[in-house]
């Protein structure tokens, strides 16, 4: 018997201090959660969305169990500890209402084990921008973790993935990781993309000026997004193009060494829910000619899409999901991870050719329109309805 229409709606679940516990908070999951769940609601596939995290006392316990003098190692050990994730699963269970069990679950990431909570064979889905194995292979992987702890973390994720009906990923590259690293059958992993975190799409600018050699970098996680590489490469660019300007958005409290400040304007963190900050960001997109984000690890990368919809060609790392959205020579350029000379050469090449920037900017806008939340959720909806029926 096919399920009724009401049963086609999913219970969205998000949680942990890593991604946030409020589904409709614009800060959760780097802003994706609000736009994703809002679109799920608009398309009629969301029963409700819930979030969970542990109490302060419980968090303190798990932090003590995973203590390390290295802050990144400490944080990673804490969040990948299966004991923390099992406790979070119990907290998710306490948030569920009786009527939730009449619907499939859709969890964000693998911070908890929603399949273990489902009853009567209800389908369970998940949506991911990464996984533990994917991160551990990157140049930004945390060093010095205890091997047994890594094994236990990977085993937890493997159990979750094999309990899911379908895993939705943001990129094809990540999809392949679930197949290769966790032995998930290929037919149970679907790449659906991700959308832009914009309230409205900007209008096309037919007369955008690409003669201004203004470069835009956006990234709260400055080191992971390749911010230091950008500053060093830009110093080389300024030696050749003294009128070039670099605008940095994202990190709070960034201290730029004096020798790297020439031509650099630091705008700090700009909030997309603040009208003044949005106006500043819109101006930067409008007045810049090129976007750069040579990340050391970037499972997908929404920021380049937001730049492309503003007609900005992008220079990004030739890896992960980035190479699926930014196409070499068509919508921007790809550079080797951590290679300052490669990055310098690409920036000089593009900034010296405004006509090429214009052509790539126009193509980039068309490319970005393939990655709206409406399309992403539509792909999910189609698949979920097929599975449920």
Image: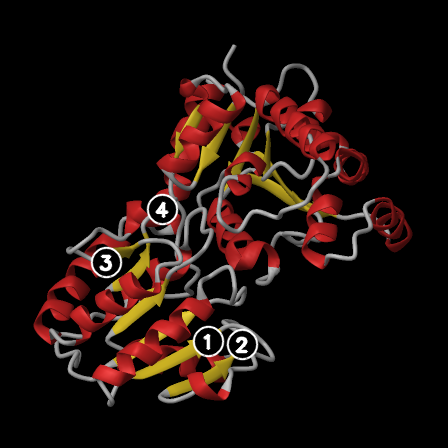
Is residue 308 in view?
no
- Counting from the top left corner in percent of width and height, residue 228 is at 46, 70
Q: Mark 4 near mark 3, Cβ–Cβ under 8 Å? A: no
Q: Residues within 10 Å of mark 2 (few under 14, many from 20)?
A: some
Q: Residue at x 50, y 19 (%)?
A: 183
Residue with the most extreme top position? 1
Which marked residue is nearer to the observer: mark 1 or mark 3?
3
Element at label 4: loop
Q: Which residue is mark 3?
A: 333
Q: Which residue is mark 1?
A: 249
The answer to which of marks 3 and 2 sits earlier in the sequence is: 2
- Counting from the top left corner in percent of width and height, residue 109 is at 58, 39
Rounded to the nearest angstrom, the CA distance separating label 4 from label 1 is 23 Å
Q: Mark 1 near mark 2, Cβ–Cβ under 8 Å? A: yes
Rounded to the nearest angstrom, the CA distance separating label 4 from label 2 is 26 Å
- Counting from the top left corner in percent of width and height, residue 95 is at 77, 40
Q: Is residue 150 left or right of residue 308?
A: right
Judge by depth and name the residue closer to the eye, 274 or 174: 174
Element at label 2: loop
Element at label 3: strand
Rounded to the nearest angstrom, the CA distance separating label 1 from label 2 is 6 Å
Rounded to the nearest angstrom, the CA distance separating label 1 from label 3 is 21 Å
The answer to which of marks 4 and 3 sits earlier in the sequence is: 4
Q: Which residue is mark 4?
A: 319
Q: Which residue is mark 2?
A: 269
């Amino acid at each position: 018997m096919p399920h009724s229409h009401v049963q086609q709606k999913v219970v969205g679940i998000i949680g942990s201090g890593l991604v946030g516990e409020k589904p409709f908070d614009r800060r959760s999951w780097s802003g994706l959660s609000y736009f994703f769940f809002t679109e799920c609601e608009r398309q009629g596939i969301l029963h409700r969305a819930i979030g969970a995290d542990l109490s302060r006392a419980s968090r303190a316990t798990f932090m003590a169990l995973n203590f390390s003098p290295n802050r990144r190692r400490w944080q990673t050990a804490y969040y990948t500890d299966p004991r923390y994730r099992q406790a979070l699963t119990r907290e998710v269970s306490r948030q569920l209402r009786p009527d939730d069990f009449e619907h499939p679950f859709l969890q964000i990431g693998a911070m908890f084990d929603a399949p273990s909570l489902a009853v009567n064979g209800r389908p369970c889905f998940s949506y991911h921008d990464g996984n533990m194995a994917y991160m551990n292979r990157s140049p930004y992987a945390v060093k010095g973790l205890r091997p047994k702890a890594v094994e236990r973390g990977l085993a937890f994720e493997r159990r979750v993935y094999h309990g899911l009906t379908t895993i939705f990923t943001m990129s094809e590259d990540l999809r392949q990781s679930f197949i290769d690293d966790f032995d998930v059958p290929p037919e149970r992993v679907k790449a659906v993309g991700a959308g832009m975190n914009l309230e409205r799409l900007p209008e096309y600018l037919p007369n955008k000026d690409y003669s201004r050699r203004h470069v835009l970098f956006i990234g709260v996680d400055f080191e992971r997004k390749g911010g230091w590489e950008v500053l060093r490469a830009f110093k080389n660019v300024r030696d050749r193009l003294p009128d070039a300007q670099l605008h940095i958005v994202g990190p709070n409290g960034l201290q730029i060494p004096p020798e790297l400040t020439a031509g650099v304007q630091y705008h700090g963190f700009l909030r997309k829910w603040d009208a003044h900050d949005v106006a500043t960001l819109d101006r930067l997109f409008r007045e810049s000619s090129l976007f750069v984000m040579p990340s050391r690890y970037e499972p997908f990368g929404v920021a380049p899409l937001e730049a492309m919809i503003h007609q900005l060609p992008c220079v990004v790392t030739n890896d992960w999901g980035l190479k699926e959205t930014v196409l070499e020579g068509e919508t921007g350029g790809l550079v080797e991870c951590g290679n300052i000379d490669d990055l310098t050469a690409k920036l000089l090449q593009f900034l010296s050719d405004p006509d090429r920037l214009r052509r790539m900017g126009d193509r980039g806008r068309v490319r970005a329109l393939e990655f709206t939340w409406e399309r992403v959720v539509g792909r999910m909806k189609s698949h979920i309805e097929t599975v449920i029926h």
